Image (spheres, helix red, strand yellow):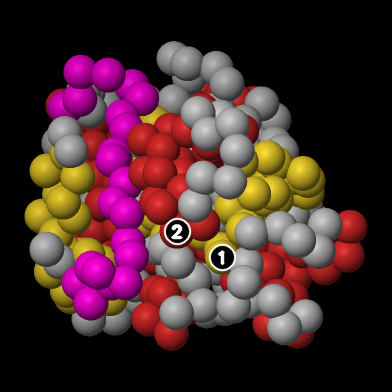
Amino acid sequence: MSQKKIGVLATGAIVALTIAGCGSSSSAAKSSGKGSASSASSGSSSSATGSTKKGGLISIIVNDPSNPFWLTEGNVAKAEAVKLGYTANVSASKGDLNTESNLVDTAIANKSRALILDPANATGSVGNVKKAEAAGIPVFLVNAEIDTPGVAKAQLISNNAQGAALGAQQWVKDVGQKGNYVELYGLPTDNNAAIRSDGYAAVLGQYPGLKKVAQQTANWIRTQGHDKMQSMLQAHPNIIGVISGNDEMALGAIAALKEAGKLNSIKVGGFDGSPDAVAAIKSGELQYTVLQPVATFAQKAVEEADEYLKTGKTGSAVEKQSFNCILITKANVSKMTGPFTYTP
């Protein structure tokens, strides 16, 4: 894992940070089935806030590191924890609440000083956060929100509404203002899916000539994006475009369109800024993606955990912190210098 400079230029956010880069994968994301996860070495120390004791374990739970988004999230958080003098381990819930609960139990048993968690479920993960907090482990959420405020010490997320508006505006430029289109929707238990879909609707609804003729849920997963695209294409062969809630589903749609010989006439937009999406933009198969600054908020979450352990405060005036996204097109894709790394 090499250290890379990352600069993320976004309205209202200063993001020039040194982070650890990571490799990429084209595998699918967020499944609803159970997934095993690794646990790491324990580090014992007091979890009391304001403690002067240094080091100890920071536990990090992501969704599924077979997806480059969560791989980056976990690697960056771990690198920052080690940089700040902690030991760290990364494990994966695979979007399963029972697995997440077991991993939280492991974090408690290992006397973790803090927990960085990408929650598996907006509602269901609340109990797991409360369990960790009750054990004296402050919890810092990344990427996905939970429905209950005041439980975690902080929630650090992408500005999904802002990113969706950016993507939808670009999508209209690419496909035009008239014609039928379809949408690939993310995991329903993840608030990000609804926020992005609503953001798309708010923009596209301004163009009466555009008609959404189908919407299918593909749960963030590439293979499901492929299969759902096939079925929508059979029912609606004359569509002009596909707008997707994430890159994995978009890449699945592209594969299905290529198989049907339709990619030249049907344009696809994504969301995440994954390495495979960047490659697809360069090749002309994907029109754009919306970069989520995952490396930025993953690092920031660990910094706030460190601050909280030292002072009893996160250093932020608000619990929920939103980080603006960046539109990536062929015009600026050359500035993607690493996985989820934009250097202006």
Position of 318 with respect to 120 (left or right) is left
Q: Which residues are magenta?
A: 315-337
Task: Say which residue appears at 82% left-offset and 57% top-offset.
Answer: 236
Residue 214, position in %: x, y?
A: 78, 46
Looking at the image, tell me whether mark 1 or mark 2 is earlier in sequence order: 2
Are the residues flagged by discs 1 and 2 in contact, CB closer than 8 Å?
yes
SS class, disc 1: strand
Front residue of 55 and 198: 198
Residue 267's tag is 1
Quadrant location of residue 282? Answer: bottom left
Q: Is residue 34 visible?
A: no
Task: Say which residue appears at 57% left-offset and 21% top-offset.
Answer: 147
SS class, disc 2: helix
Task: Tell whether position 263 is magenta.
Answer: no
Front residue of 332 and 57: 332
Which three-letter amino acid code belongs to the residue tagged 1?
Lys
Residue 103, position in %: x, y?
A: 61, 50
Task: Say which residue appears at 53% left-offset and 34% top-offset.
Answer: 207
Residue beneath label 2, please?
Answer: 174
User: CA gap, disc 1 to disc 2?
Assistant: 7 Å
Residue 268, position in %: x, y?
A: 56, 63
Position of 67 with respect to 79 (left or right) is right
Front residue of 338 and 79: 338
Task: Say which residue appears at 10% left-offset and 55% top-offset.
Answer: 16
